Amino acid sequence: MANTLKQGTLFPATLIPELISKVKGHSVLAKLSDQTPIPFNGTEQFIFNLDGNAQIVGEGEQKQAGGATLTSKVIKPLKFVYQARITNEFMYASDEKKINYLQTFADGFAKKIAEAFDIAAIHGLEPKALTDASFRGTNSFDGVIDGNIVTYEEATIDNNIEAAVQAIRAKGGDVTGLALSPTAGGALGKLKDANRSHIFPEFRFGQNPDSFYGMKSDINKTLLTSGGTAEKDHVIVGDFQNMFKWGYAENIPMEVIEYGDPDGAGRDLKAYNEVCLRAEAFIGWGILDKDAFARVKEA
């Protein structure tokens, strides 16, 4: 059994903005949507749907009722953990050198957390084991977006995207973002017009443009993550700006473990002159309206 914590702290405040910036750079969901702070005990997002139009009331006229429905979504953060072994020189280094160690660790931590966030929120998987999580059916795109579905066809990927957008627009929704798999991005890059000219040259040679016809866009391999009952999503399109919310609790605790085998690697830390850096991020997310999104997936 791993020994108890010998030293505990928080990531230096100067590293937190940089760390979260890196998460936004590697997570397709973080790139396409806005982040909002999430308290440890969660937050409740309210959605008003107002029917009909506003009324102009003349003198002596009655004010008429309008239709309204109210729904809510509780967003509660989950704990994401990542740990790595480094040489125990870290324990004896100067504060300046420790910051250098932590900056390197923070870079790897941000990438792993960004990928884990996408895998969990898109497919409803536990990121490490790649098995179905308890929230798959209630808080993941694979589990929640079950109505606006288009079957993927490589040769007509542009028509696939258009059909997905129209499914959202037909229900009164807006489209602000486009998430693509590398396969779908490559398919867009290969499309040619009647003159054999490339229609979307910005997607050729593995490029990842930031926008597509006024929508924020991103190409990310996490859309094709395999495991559990995850589906192969080549496109997720919808109102990421308003109908998908995510955030993190600001404190990111870090532990420095000197003894035992805390990560199950099969070797004692002290015997190999190592320490284990363990960090935890509390991230919450919520899909506020499933009709505001559509998926293009493999049959």
Image: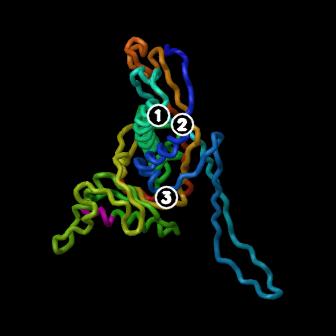
Decide which of 233, 271 is in the foreground and name it. Answer: 271
Q: Residue at x 81, y 88 (%)?
A: 59
Which residue extends farthest left?
A: 196
> As shown in the figure, which amino acid type bears the numbered disc 2?
Pro
C-alpha span from label 2 to label 1: 8 Å
Q: What residue is shown with label 2?
A: 12
Residue 233 placement (x, y as % from top left): 37, 51
Earlier-in-chain disc, 2 versus 1 = 2
Q: Secondary structure at mark 3?
A: helix
Point out the stretch of residues depicted in magenta. Answer: 155-159
> As shown in the figure, which amino acid type bears the numbered disc 1?
Ile
Q: Is residue 79 visible?
A: no
| 183 shown above or below 251 | below
Decide which of 69, 88 is in the foreground and name it. Answer: 88
Residue 277 placement (x, y as % from top left): 46, 27
Q: How many numbered discs, if any?
A: 3
Q: What residue is shown with label 3?
A: 240
Q: What residue is shown with label 1?
A: 99
Decide which of 5, 222 is in the foreground and name it. Answer: 5
* Residues at discs 3 and 2 in contact (Cβ within 8 Å): no
Q: Residue at x 33, y 60 (%)?
A: 209
Q: Residue at x 65, y 56 (%)?
A: 46
* Residues at discs 2 and 1 in contact (Cβ within 8 Å): yes
Q: Secondary structure at mark 1?
A: helix
C-alpha span from label 3 to label 2: 31 Å
> As shown in the figure, which amino acid type bears the numbered disc 3?
Phe
